[in-house]
Image: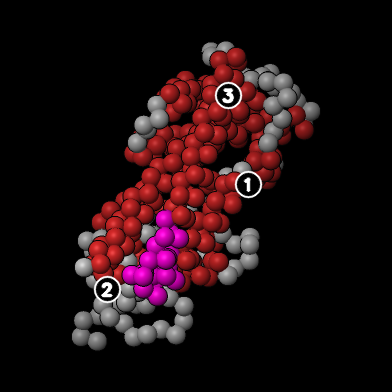
């Protein structure tokens, strides 16, 4: 009876870890969106001529890319492009400002809400940062453009920026605590006698991936460049019913909801090479140089399917 209870407890641990992964993804999306909003409002202040709002390293990198693309344009053509970008930034500022206040005031933003907001903020950032880069290019040619004027007072923009920064810091602390909590759960699971050897390997590698992400976040680096994207982490890949089957390749958030109901994979001959699924890919990533990111490792190509009758 104790064995049955212990086995049930382990399956419950796996289910709880999957729920915490879903919460982690929501925290990550919220923090990432707040980061992008911070960049957006900072760019607005730069375009508005705020004192001390010097271009960031990201702005300078964007400038270099744009400089190569527009080097042959005349100053008149650059001014025309900047005028068009000015209009896009002005038209979108009210919407971006409203989104900022919504995320700051409402802690219950759903993942679907964030998935709608995030691309809009990214689009705004592209317009604003390109505008900044083109203005810098014109200044290097000896032409200075007047600061961009907005209907929203600069003080109001600065206040929204301060609130976004405060909210971002709070959510980031919650994100760190949640990852630490998940690692604690993994430690308990690894100590469970019902954790098979194949599962032990899986969860050890998963713990290392979470540890790498934790170090990245605590270093203040961009969430868009996590060493191991959270959506690529599968929790149930090491569950008992899958222990003797190849680990499934990482799936996206929408696909993950239906992955559990997918038909079982056919039996295949043992492969002397590292497992082609998530576990093998994680091992390759962890043994790669520090500068190699998860997305730099391409999943191995699937073998061609045999046609009927062959």
Q: Position of residue 176 (x, y in %)?
A: 52, 45
Q: Residue at x 69, y 40 (%)?
A: 57
Q: Which residue is mark 3?
A: 162
Q: Nearer the viewer, residue 73 or 158?
A: 158
For marks 3 and 1, give the one nearer the viewer: 1
Q: Residue at x 61, y 28 (%)?
A: 42
Q: Position of residue 247 (x, y in %)?
A: 36, 70
The part of the chain drawn in magenta is 185-203
Q: Are marks 3 and 1 in contact (CB under 8 Å)?
A: no
The stretch drawn in magenta includes residue 119: no
Residue 280 visible in the displayed image: yes
Q: Is residue 6 above or below residue 33?
A: below
Q: Is residue 79 left or right of residue 255?
A: right
Dot 1: within a 10 Å radius of its alpha carbon, few (fewer than 14), some, or many (20 or more) residues?
few
Dot 3: within a 10 Å radius of its alpha carbon, few (fewer than 14), some, or many (20 or more) residues?
some
Mark 3 to mark 1 CA distance (whole Å): 21 Å
Q: Residue at x 44, y 52 (%)?
A: 182
Q: Which residue is mark 1?
A: 219
First in sequence: mark 2 vs mark 3: 3
Q: Is residue 25 left or right of residue 84?
A: left
| Mark number, residue 21 | none
Q: Secondary structure at mark 3?
A: helix
Q: Main secondary structure of the magenta part?
A: helix
Q: Are marks 1 and 2 in contact (CB under 8 Å)?
A: no
Mark 2 to mark 3 CA distance (whole Å): 51 Å
For marks 2 and 3, give the one nearer the viewer: 3
Q: Is residue 252 above or below residue 55?
A: below
Q: Which residue is mark 2?
A: 265
- Residue at the far front in the pictured view: 2
Residue 256 visible in the displayed image: no
């Amino acid at each position: 009876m104790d064995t049955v209870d212990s086995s049930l407890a382990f399956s419950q641990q796996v289910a709880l870890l999957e729920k915490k992964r879903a919460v982690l993804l929501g925290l990550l999306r919220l923090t990432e969106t707040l980061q992008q909003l911070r960049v957006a409002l900072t760019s607005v202040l730069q375009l508005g001529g705020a004192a001390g709002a010097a271009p960031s390293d990201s702005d300078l990198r964007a400038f270099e890319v744009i400089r190569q693309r527009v080097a042959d344009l005349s100053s008149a053509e650059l001014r025309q492009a900047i005028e068009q970008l000015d209009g896009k930034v002005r038209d979108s500022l009210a919407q971006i400002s409203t989104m900022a206040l919504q995320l700051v005031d409402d802690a219950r933003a759903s993942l679907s809400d964030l998935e709608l907001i995030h691309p809009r903020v990214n689009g705004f950032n592209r317009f604003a940062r390109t505008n900044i880069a083109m203005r810098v290019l014109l200044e290097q040619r000896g032409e200075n453009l007047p600061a961009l004027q907005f209907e929203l007072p600069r003080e109001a923009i600065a206040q929204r920026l301060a609130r976004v920064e405060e909210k971002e810091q709070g959510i980031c602390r919650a994100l760190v605590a949640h990852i630490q909590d998940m690692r604690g759960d993994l430690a308990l699971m690894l100590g469970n006698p019902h954790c098979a050897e194949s599962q032990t390997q899986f969860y050890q590698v998963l713990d290392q991936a979470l540890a790498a992400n934790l170090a990245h976040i605590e270093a203040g680096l961009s969430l868009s460049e996590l060493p191991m994207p959270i959506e690529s982490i599968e929790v149930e890949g090491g569950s008992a019913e899958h222990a003797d089957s190849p680990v499934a390749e990482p799936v996206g958030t929408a696909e993950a909801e239906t992955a559990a109901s997918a038909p079982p994979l056919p039996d295949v001959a043992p492969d002397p090479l590292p497992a082609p699924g998530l576990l093998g890919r994680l091992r390759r990533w962890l043994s790669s140089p520090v500068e190699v990111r998860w997305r730099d490792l391409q999943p191995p190509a699937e073998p061609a399917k045999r046609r009927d009758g062959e």
